[in-house]
Amino acid sequence: MKMVMIIYNEAIDEEVMGSLTACSIENFTKWQRVLGKGKTSGPHLDSSVWPGANNVCMTVVEDGNVNLLLEQVRGLRKQLGKEGIKAFVLPVEEMTG
């Protein structure tokens, strides 16, 4: 299993949530109004000088479904590139619960 963490401009939340639905992903954790600075997207610090914020969505998926989700993210990046979106894939060694 893999954990996919998607960090994206809050302005494209609807599109990102649609991508999860398109991949039949029902379980996720989302943090809203996350502050940060990306190499290509610039600062999103929710201030008058650096307006805007990001969201972070994390989900754990079977190895075989990772590429489908990454393709969705690549499609959004191509379509909405200037808004900012990145995905990170991490191994899941163990899950409890």
Image (spheres, rainbow, N blue to C red):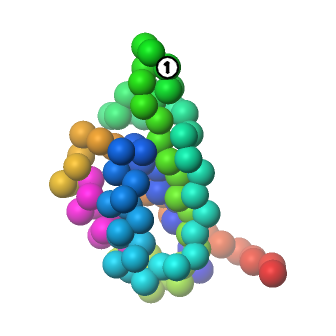
Position of 6 relative to 10 (above/below):
below
Question: Where in the figure is residue 2, as x and y percent of width and height?
Answer: 56, 73
At mark 1, the secondary structure is loop
The magenta stretch is: 69-77
Quadrant containing the C terminus is bottom right
Q: Give x and y (percent) for residue 26.
A: 52, 79
Image location of residue 18, percent across then percent down: 35, 69
Q: Residue furthest top?
A: 49
Q: Is residue 38 left or right of residue 15?
A: right
What residue is shown at x 50% (from left), y 26% (from top)?
A: 45
User: Quick check: can you spot residue 74?
Assistant: yes
Q: Is residue 90 visible?
A: no
The residue at 43%/20% (across/down) is 50
The residue that mark 1 highlights is 47
- Graded by Cα atoms within 10 Å as few (under 14), some (14 to 19) or many (20 or more), the crowding at tag 1 reads few
Secondary structure mostly seen in magenta is helix
